[in-house]
Image: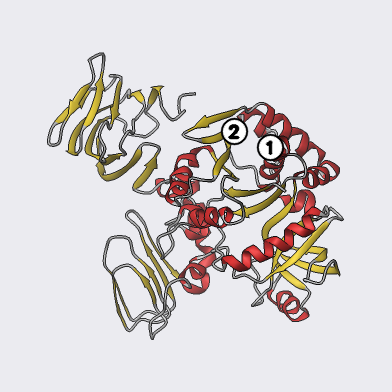
């Protein structure tokens, strides 16, 4: 039996702004223990398969390098990482269809898939493994299995699954129906009945089973997914296997969830009642529960002074936060944005992100510190005609050979050594406390030839300083189209 965990890593997590952003979405958020949701999901997936087994991740093309780095932090080199890189988000049905097509092609239609969301938190690993063993038994008999979570409260933010006919002695049942997010009274009735489970969005099935059911209920998805995969040949990068999905063929896939496309229509859907702890970390209120509370039920991560404060969650980045005489608040401070919200309105934070997106505001897309394949940059200061960045290049890292139309750059090396190409000159080594100047219009490249991080200060000046003023000629990371 071949088992392939499939991690779906997408979604903006707008209810967790200002930490979660378009360029740094929810799966990459660090939890209080220092690990990200994505790293935890990868470790959970790795625990399901033997050494050397494959883990398939479906994510956006722009998030590949950050994902690869986080998987590297997990220190599991004996697992093979495969990536399906989407040019844009198209919901779960296209992602699962392409993943199932790839698995069927490589391992056969009897290969089993466990579909896992990268932004879920499950801390009881043993219980998750037991639930998956149960799901695999039903999946091998041809069922499309979904993990149901026993409700602990009349939650109105989740979809529900009604259990039907029993399929085994362990609680596996046919699905009677899927139910959209209910109102409070209906959710209370569901809780009392004992027949309803929360819809977790995790699944288990064979590649052949899901492709056949999709072929019956949404045949265009299967056809377009297979065409897209055929147009997206495998590439190898640093030991990882990549399929960069062709933009034109991927765009033809409909934007639809797997629930709407097949789960709500198929007669082969089963549900297992999972006993493990589960959270989709869908709001700041949910994330705050991971932080211990003090005697006044305040939860603090960071540096804070609280005076006559109760039932308040504070997450600080680098600054001291002080509160006086407040109750029931959420305060989240990052380098460039601060959120203050009533705790009972945590779900409405998404409206802030929506407004920022409509205004094309930078704080919807990026943090002050931005991750790149070669390292990071942090915007320290900016104003009319100037911007100052701190640039960190990993050992062996290299920026693209590029040119800017509207800005010149002055580079000062703080630590490490830089190898610089500037115009048509031979590469120049720039040591600590030395600098070099890049005029506008010059082709240039920055590399770190050393074994420690290269840290630099970059001072930009010019009429336009936007990140889109980059013309790339060569790139080690496939960013030249």
| Percent x, y of residue 351 | 52, 58
- Residue projecting furthest to the bottom: 295
Q: Mark 1 points at which residue?
A: 102
In-front residue for pair 125/41: 125
Q: Can residue 9 be seen in this view?
A: yes
In-front residue for pair 299/149: 149
Question: Secondary structure beneath disc 2?
Answer: strand
| Dot 2 alpha-carbon crowd within 10 angstroms: few under 14, some 14 to 19, many 20 or more | many
In-front residue for pair 90/151: 151
- Residue projecting furthest to the top: 424
| Dot 1 alpha-carbon crowd within 10 angstroms: few under 14, some 14 to 19, many 20 or more | many
| Percent x, y of residue 18 | 42, 57
Up/down of 8 relative to 283, above or below: above
| Percent x, y of residue 420 | 24, 25
In-front residue for pair 458/417: 417
Find the distance from the CA under tag 1 to the CA under tag 2: 10 Å
Q: Which residue is drawn at 69% across and 43% down?
A: 255
In the picture, the disc for residue 243 is 2
Which image quadrant for residue 319?
bottom left
Q: Which residue is drawn at 25% across and 40% down?
A: 452
| Percent x, y of residue 207 | 75, 44
């Amino acid at each position: 039996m071949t088992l392939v965990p499939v991690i779906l890593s997408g979604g903006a997590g707008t209810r967790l702004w200002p930490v979660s952003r378009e360029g740094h979405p929810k799966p990459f958020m660090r939890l209080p223990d220092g690990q990200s949701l994505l790293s935890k999901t990868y470790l959970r997936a790795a625990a399901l398969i033997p050494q050397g087994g494959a883990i398939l991740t479906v994510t956006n093309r722009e998030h590949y390098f950050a994902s690869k780095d986080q998987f590297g932090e997990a220190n599991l080199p004996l697992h093979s990482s495969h990536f399906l890189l989407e040019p844009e988000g198209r919901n779960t049905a296209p992602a699962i269809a392409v993943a199932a097509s790839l698995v069927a092609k490589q391992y056969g239609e009897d290969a089993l898939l466990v579909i896992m969301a990268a932004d879920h938190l499950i801390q009881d690993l043993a219980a998750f493994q037991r639930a998956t063993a149960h799901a695999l038994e039903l999946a091998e008999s041809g069922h499309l299995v979904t993990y149901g979570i026993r409700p602990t409260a009349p939650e109105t933010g989740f979809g529900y699954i009604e259990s039907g006919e029993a399929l085994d002695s362990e609680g596996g049942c046919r699905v009677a129906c899927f139910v959209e997010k209910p109102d409070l009274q209906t959710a209370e009735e569901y809780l009392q009945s004992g027949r309803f489970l929360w819809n977790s969005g995790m699944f288990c099935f064979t590649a052949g089973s899901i492709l056949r059911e999709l072929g019956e209920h949404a045949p265009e998805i299967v056809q377009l997914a297979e065409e897209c995969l055929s147009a997206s040949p495998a590439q190898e990068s640093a030991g990882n296997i990549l399929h960069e999905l062709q933009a034109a063929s991927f765009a033809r896939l409909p934007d639809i969830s797997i629930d709407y496309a097949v789960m709500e229509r198929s007669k082969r859907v089963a549900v297992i009642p999972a006993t493990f702890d589960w959270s989709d970390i869908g709001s700041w209120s949910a994330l705050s529960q991971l932080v211990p509370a003090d005697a006044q039920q305040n939860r603090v991560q960071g540096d804070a002074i609280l005076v006559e404060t109760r039932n308040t969650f504070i997450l600080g980045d680098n600054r001291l936060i002080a509160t006086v005489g407040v109750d029931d608040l959420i305060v989240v401070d990052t380098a460039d944005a601060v959120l203050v919200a009533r705790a009972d309105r945590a779900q409405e934070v998404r409206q802030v992100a929506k407004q920022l997106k409509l205004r094309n505001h930078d704080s919807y897309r990026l943090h002050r510190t931005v991750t790149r394949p070669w390292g990071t940059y942090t915007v320290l200061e900016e104003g009319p005609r100037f911007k100052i960045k701190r640039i960190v290049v990993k050992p062996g890292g290299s920026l693209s050979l590029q040119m800017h139309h509207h800005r010149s750059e002055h580079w000062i090396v703080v630590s490490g050594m830089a190898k610089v190409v500037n115009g048509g000159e031979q590469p120049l080594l720039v040591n600590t406390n030395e600098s070099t100047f890049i005029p506008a219009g010059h082709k240039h490249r920055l590399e770190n030839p050393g074994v420690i991080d290269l840290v630099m200060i970059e001072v930009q000046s010019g009429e336009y300083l936007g990140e889109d003023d980059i013309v790339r000629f060569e790139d080690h990371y496939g960013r030249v189209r």
